[in-house]
Image (cartoon, helix red, strand yellow):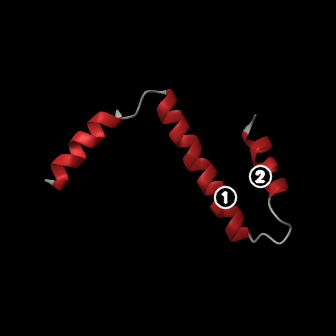
Amino acid sequence: MGEKATVLKLLEQLPEETTLEEIQYHLYVLQKIRAGQNAVDNGHVIPHEDVMRELAGWLA
C-alpha cells in the first residue's frame, strides 16, 4: 500500500470531529512505526540479550 493510500485509510478511520492536531499526531505515530519496521527490515536493531546486559550494567 502506498503512502497516500495509507493516509487516506487513516483519515477514513478517524471520527469526523478529529482536529488537525490529532491528525498530525496520528501521522507522526504512523511515521515512527514505519521507521521502526524499516530498521528491523534492514537489521538495524540491538538483540534483546545485549540490551538487558547493558541495562544491568546501568542499574548495578
Identified at 80% across, 60% down, the residue is 14
Identified at 75% across, 44% down, the residue is 6
Question: Which of 7 and 60 lies nearest the eye of the viewer?
Answer: 60
Question: Which of 52 and 15 lies nearest the eye of the viewer?
Answer: 52
Q: CA distance from mark 1 to mark 2?
A: 8 Å
43 to 18, vertically: above or below:
above
Left/right of residue 29 with respect to residue 52 in the rendered view:
right
Left/right of residue 3 with respect to residue 16 in the rendered view:
left
- Which quadrant of the figure has residue 27? bottom right
Locate the N terminus and report the quarter of the image it occupies.
Answer: top right
The residue to which callout 2 is attached is 10
Residue 45 horizontal/vertical position (percent)? 39, 34
Mark 1: secondary structure: helix
- Is the Cβ of the residue at disc 1 closer than 8 Å to that at disc 2? yes
**Mark 1 crowdedness (10 Å alpha carbons): few <14, some 14-19, many ≥20:** some
38 to 18, vertically: above or below:
above
**Mark 2 crowdedness (10 Å alpha carbons): few <14, some 14-19, many ≥20:** some
Residue 50 horizontal/vertical position (percent)? 27, 35
Residue 13 horizontal/vertical position (percent)? 81, 55
Residue 32 horizontal/vertical position (percent)? 55, 49
Left/right of residue 51 with respect to residue 44 in the rendered view:
left
The residue to which callout 1 is attached is 26
Task: State which tag comes first along the sequence, 1 or 2.
Answer: 2
27 to 51, vertically: above or below:
below
Identified at 47% across, 27% down, the residue is 42
Question: Which of 25 and 55 lies nearest the eye of the viewer?
Answer: 55
The amino acid type of the residue labelled 1 equals: His
The amino acid type of the residue labelled 2 equals: Leu
Mark 2: secondary structure: helix
Q: Residue furthest left?
A: 60
Identified at 71% across, 63% down, the residue is 23
